Amino acid sequence: MAKRAKFSKASKKSANAKRSARGGAAAARVSTHVAGAHYSAADLEHIAARILKLSDADETEVEIDSSVDALTRFANNTIHQNVAEQTLVISVRANVDGRTARATTNKTDEESLRRVAAAVVRLARNEPKNPDLLPMLKRQKYQPVDRFYAATAAATPETRARAVTRVCKMADAAKQTAAGIFSTGFAQSLLVNSKGLLARYDHTDSEFSITILEEKSSGWAKASSPNVADIDPEALARGASHKAAASREPRELEPGHYTAILEPSAALDMVGSLFFDFSATAVADKRSCLNDRMGRKVVGDNITLHDDVFHPLQVGAPWDGEGVPRENVVLIEKGVPKNLVYSRATAKKLKKKPTGHGFTLPNEYGEAPVNLVFKGGDSSVEKMIASTERGILVTRLWYIREVDPYEKTITGMTRDGTFLVEDGKISGGVRNFRFNQSILAALSNVEALGPAVRAAGEESFEMVVPAMKISNFHFSEVTKF
């Protein structure tokens, strides 16, 4: 057991984006007991109550996450692995004389609960006083969200295997090779404290990802949803198969500035690097690309961005790491940064109102919006292609790294379906590019937007974004892959 700052960065999937909670009648409906779970809601509340009773801290907070996740993995057109994992994390925070610390355990016997309650108090007493530490919250009211789907929770290895078998047979028939994963799972979350706070939520998740390989080309598709019925593995496989076939014998183009058509997954992983810049802590610490830019036009008029956990295509908690109710925040309106998000401590320091975007304490990051929703448009990828004289169609991006934090310049590579567009048509596959591009400049050059959809990538957590047609996108070199 040890003190820890509970936060993971946006590369891959953010744990904060995945963790969710809700109050009200919907929570009571699904939280009584989830089929297959080791613990009922009553069990988790009993564990938390025991810790609160055992703790002699000034204030005590208990966060419990219980999950069941299963995954079917396939490669070479064959299922080769099925794994399932059940986890329980009991995380305890103590406030003692202006100090705070956190300790964790995954054991539920009386002695283990006694040890974690004592350990966190010892840790807190050895911490320096934190002048920004605030009292724990009293009971809050949360807008209910319902992201638990019984069919997802009940999905079996046979359910996933049947879908995977169909897509592997499709690949076999096309003389292609398929690889990927199909996962399903559910989680129960509970946050309570000694001041009377109680937040509880059950949610489900599912994900299907497939890469179709040929000798010199590949195609890819991915989708995620709380509702497994929203995922169509065969449709995703058909799309990936088509891209692999269409990009056979890719030609090599000269690097340079091209019109880029980014499909939603590629747009997601490009703009995903932005989320931390809307943190009030990052701006106060001069670590944001929005320093000296708030209230000024920084991107195109057609760019509007919200953080909205209640959007029907989003997932996430209606409360943050301390239990503050989340708010819908307008971050960019018609190209102009309008608002930042605030944790309780940052809001008090800057004389603002907390927005419900703080991370679990203690942490050094403060806060960030993790439920990003871009406003879409009325175009489509097909219309974007038809209106392009010469450009590059990009399926996805990977290996993204930040080059210049203030200009928000990033670098990375295209993969799994990169095509040349000529005279309004796809003329064939091209070798993958490395790009070197300012996100702010790219969002200033958006010529067309598709409808906003729930997109899944590999470099950032899922968000709601449209496909984007961007002029003057800098592809800096051809890659070896």
Image (cartoon, rainbow, N blue to C red):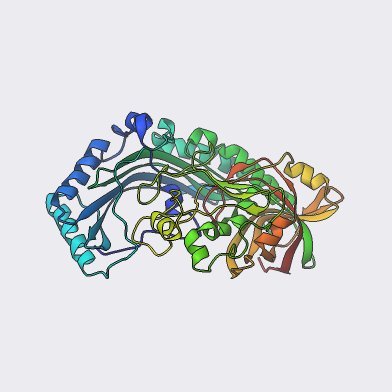
Q: Nearer the viewer, residue 449 or 478?
A: 449
Residue 257 rendering spot, x and y as whole percentages: 78, 64
Q: Quadrant of the C terminus?
A: bottom right
**Residue 328 in view, yes or no:** yes
Q: Quadrant of residue 299?
A: bottom right
Can you name the residue that lies furthest to the front here? Answer: 351
Q: Nearer the viewer, residue 390 or 235?
A: 390
Residue 412 rendering spot, x and y as whole percentages: 63, 65
Q: Residue at x 66, y 58 (%)?
A: 296
Q: Nearer the viewer, residue 6 or 385?
A: 6
**Residue 213 in view, yes or no:** no
Q: Quadrant of residue 477?
A: bottom right
Q: Quadrant of residue 235?
A: top right
The mark tally for this picture is 0
Q: Residue at x 40, y 49 (%)?
A: 320
Residue 450 rendering spot, x and y as whole percentages: 70, 43
Q: Nearer the viewer, residue 165 or 3?
A: 3
222 lies above or below 231: below
Q: Residue at x 29, y 44 (%)?
A: 138
